[in-house]
Structures are given as C-alpha cells and as structure tokens.
Image (cartoon, rainbow, N blue to C red):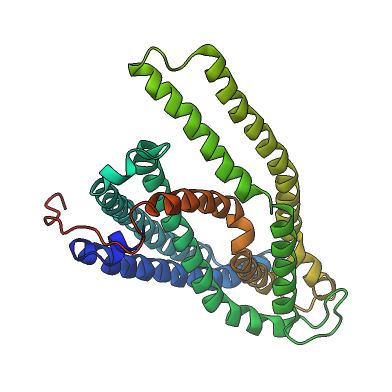
Amino acid sequence: MFKSFFLARRWLLWSWPGAALIFFGTWYQVQIDVQINDWFGGFYDIVQKALGKPGEVTLEEFFGFLMTFGKLAGIYVLVAVMLSFFTKHWVFRWRHAMNDFYMSHWDKLRTIEGASQRVQEDTKRFATIMESLGSNMMDSLMTLVAFLPILWELSKKVANVPLLGQVDHALVYVAILFALAGTVVLALVGIKLPGLEFNNQRVEAAYRKELVHAEDDASRGSEPVVKDLFSHVRSNYFRLFFHYMYFDVAKFSYLQFGVLVPYIALGPTVVAGAITLGAMQQIVRAFGRVEMSFQFLVRSWGTIVELISVYKRLRAFEAQIGTAAMPRAAQPDTAG
C-alpha cells in the first residue's frame, strides 16, 4: 500500500514532492484564513462604529473592507482549486502504483475471494481516503499552530467564564476540554463500527463473487444460494444502520451544541460590555478554528472507520505475497 508508491523509484517524483506540494498548499490556505480572521475584527468594529455613531464611517471605508475580503477570498479560491486539481492527479498515481504492484503478483492473488474488487475498488478507496484524511489532519495541525496563539492572546480580553470563573486564557482550556470530551464519548459510542464495516465488505464480496461466477457458469448463482448470500448483506446493513443511528445522534448533537460553546463562554464578558463586536467575532472565529482542529477525530470518525475496513482487506490481500515485497521495476510513467 505505502511501499509501492513512496519507496518505488518509478514514483519518487510524484510521491514525496507531491506530498510536499500538498503540504505547502494547505499551509498557505491556513495563512489566508488567519488574515481573514484579522479582517473580521476590523470589519465588525467599523460596523459597530457606524451603527453607534452615524456618519463616523464613510462609504469608501466600508467598501474598502469588502474589497480587501474579496481579494483574500479570490486568492483562497484559486489556491483551493489548483490544490484540488493536483491532489486528484496525485491520488490517482498512488492508486496506479498499488494497481501495478498487485497485478505483478496476480498469479498469487487471483484465487482470493473478491480479488478483482480489491484491486479495482479497494485501491481506489484506500488512496482517496488516505489523501482526504491526511489533508484534513495537516489542515487541522496547521490551523491549530496558527490559531492557538491567536486565541491565547484574544483570551486576555475575557475575564470571566461560566463554571471556570476567572482563569487566564480560559477560552483555550474550554476548547481543549470540549473537544477532548467529544472525542472520548464518540470513540466509545462508535467502537463497534470498524468491525461492522469490515464484515460489510466481506459479505458484499461473497455476494458479488457468486454473481460474477454465475455469468459464466450456469450451475452457479442458484436462487437459494443468492437469496442466502443477500440475506447476509441485508442483515449486516441493518445492523450497521442501527449502530450508525445512535452514533449520528451523539455526533450531531455534540457538533450542534459546540456552536454555542464560545458564546456561552463569552456571555459574562459580552453582557459587561468589555469587548467590541469586532473582538467578539475574532474570538468566536478563532475559537471555532481551534476547536475544529481538536475535533479532527470526531469529524473524521466515519472516514476512519471506512479506512480501517479497507486497510484490513488490503493487508490480508498482501499477506499472500509478503508485505515486505517491493514492486517490480517498471517503465517511466509517460502518461504524466
């Protein structure tokens, strides 16, 4: 899975430089987001000033702020589009590397249940999920590095927080505690999901294999056999739906309540009139970014569950050829 792309000579110009480019693009997007957060503070301060003292803010100043946001947003969109385009090509190269590796050992793999599906479908899903999770994790870490000092500094303006009282930099501790609590709770609630997802792929593969054989062999695919195989598919899906139902209740309840957390924490400070509207917007936005970074596992749990099930299937697949084996030498990728 990893060696066939990151350690194979054929793909060295794509794997590591490509990962570095994705890393840099993600970092640049975070830096633009920091500038947008600063913009929110200044913009809402002039809005407060304009509403409180009519005539104090000119139309040129107001539209000047909007133009600044437009420039930042335009750069962000351009970087996001180009990064997305490159990432799609990078992911396909990873899939290409895995495909070539498995096909070079096809004589040892063809007898495994669902072998064709693992080469065609699982390699695609694995590369795509790994890229998505990796990008999100990088974004979360970079966002945390960028916004945690901002929230730490802005927290000086908040003197009192409900339940915690007067604690220095209290908003940072609130974000950490809330994210940690959500991660632990949802990990416990969703503990059965990886096994169910893995079993789901197993029963689907058995059902699909019987139908494929039935296309060429009239003795295969009899109605009782097909019904029995599909009953296993249905049973596993229904169990999966049930477990995802209470997991989703916990997840979405937690995330929706999280929207209110910074406002609850700011309640005494806002009522006391100790901060401006712009400062409040900066704090809420910075709090949201820090909280979202700490919630990486919470927001990605469903994807992680899917990745675990795909990884188990591919690891079992590679056990037939030895996971230490390296891909055979291949010709340069002339397709670009």
Let me know if residue 55 appears in the view: no
- Residue 325, image quadrant: bottom left
Question: Residue drawn 47% across and 68% down?
Answer: 138
Where does the N terminus fall, quadrant-wise? bottom left
Residue 91 horizontal/vertical position (percent): 33, 53
* In this view, 278 is above or below 238: below
Residue 315 horizontal/vertical position (percent): 44, 54
| Count of numbered circles in the view | 0
Of residues 233 and 32, which is closer to you in this image? Answer: 233
Of residues 248 and 74, which is closer to you in this image? Answer: 248
- Residue 268, image quadrant: bottom right
252 sits left or right of 123 in the view: right
Question: Residue drawn 41% across and 44% down?
Answer: 122
Residue 241 horizontal/vertical position (percent): 67, 36
Question: Residue drawn 37% across and 47% down?
Answer: 123
Residue 35 horizontal/vertical position (percent): 48, 72
Let me know if residue 287 appears in the view: yes
112 sits left or right of 99 in the view: right
79 sits left or right of 142 in the view: left
